[in-house]
Image (cartoon, helix red, strand yellow):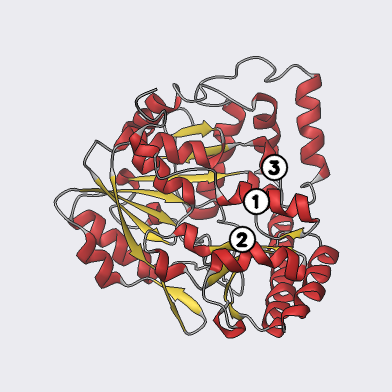
Amino acid sequence: MTRPPLNRRLAEFGTTIFAEMSALAAESGAINLGQGFPDTDGPEEIREAAVRALRDGRGNQYPPGPGVPELRTAIADHQRERYGLAYDPDTEVLVTAGATEAIAASLLALVEPGDEVIALEPYYDSYAACVAMAGGTRVPVTLRPHEGSYVLDLDELRAAVTDRTRLILLNTPHNPTGTVLTRAELTAVAELAVERDLLVVTDEVYEHLVFDGAEHVPIASLPGMRERTVTISSAGKTFSFTGWKVGWITASPELTSAVRSAKQFLTYVSAGPFQYAVAEALRLPDAYFDGLRAGLAAKRDLLAEGLARAGFGVYRPSGTYFVTTDIRPLGATDGFAFCRSLPERAGVVAIPNAVFYDHRDAGAPFVRFAFCKKTEVLEEAVSRLKRLA
């Protein structure tokens, strides 16, 4: 073969760090606090709803392309009841194979080769790959550590916009930093998008995982934004059924139709029986969502305090289920080397934040831990990490 088999757009993307670190955890017997998935299932009644759908023959064959009507209606109701956003379930809601497909389909549909896409760095690794597949050029705007959290420099964001900018790719609550963009910050982003006639694709999969009184504000709810925003969310993070891969977008009819045009040639449809179960999950009472937040906040505190005692610098997250740490107080500066040695040194696996950066040096001394695990697992991890102190 005279040419490399991998498309040049994807040449920089090999096996993900998540696969590497999860394999290392399996080989070493270390506690895996790297990949962000829970180690327990979600509500039993929702799992039983999926079983019931299977047994009743609902979704065992191809479901409708946009998603089953019950789920599209539940998504529309959720957006209206939670955020005051009214969407037509028939023309403004699209069910996808998780949020990852929603991101891919949105960028493939809306980005032309040569378009610039602004993303908040550090960012989930699929963002870079999806921009590349669409032929776009990613333009990172870096969230920077400041007084125990990460902040967005709005002047830097404005300066990043050029005549070639097509859209801004947002993520709030933000993975991996745990930042929840404030209403004031999002208002400034919205004003910029309107002024420069930009689209916004916003990944809000952690919308229900916010702590300490933080407010999740969908940017689509701000003036001038509903018609230019594709809002993405999913069931995986909120209901702890990540393997079901049920995500969705809400957007104007024109944007929804565009994203569906790309989505239909990716998976076409997926997760038929699970869609019915997620429709029921979205109608769970507020007590479920309140309990989810309270439980995760307690786990966050347990892990964050343990990491601080072990000697890490800790950035306390306002959302998601990840804690970003600074390894420099431990005498280390290379997150990759630190994470690859951590299973042997302490029996724990984490993820180097540098994989989420274009500017690798900016992320080099930071490491991410997930706290969406059983309390006893986190307690054992904290106990093992004491070896580093």
Per the model, the C-alpha gap separating discs 3 and 1 is: 9 Å
The relative height of residue 42 versus residue 218 in the rendered view (above or below) is above
Where is residue 172 drawn, in percent x and y?
A: 47, 59
**Helix or strand or loop: what does disc 1 sit on?**
helix
Q: Residue at x 45, y 44 (%)?
A: 13
| Quadrant position of the C terminus in the picture | bottom right
Per the model, the C-alpha gap separating discs 1 and 2 is: 7 Å
Where is residue 57 drawn, in percent x and y?
A: 75, 16
**Helix or strand or loop: what does disc 2 sit on?**
loop
Structural crowding at the residue carrying mark 2, measured as other residues with C-alpha within 10 Å and reported as few (<14), some (14–19) or many (≥20): many
Q: Closer to the camera, 171 or 164?
A: 164
* Left or right of 70, for residue 232: left
Tell me the number on the disc at residue 209.
Answer: 2
Task: Answer whether labels 3 and 1 touch (C-beta < 8 Å).
Answer: yes
Residue of label 1: 238
Is there any visible trace of residue 175 in the rendered image? yes
* Left or right of 107, for residue 303: right
Where is residue 142 drawn, in percent x and y?
A: 36, 67
Residue of label 3: 281
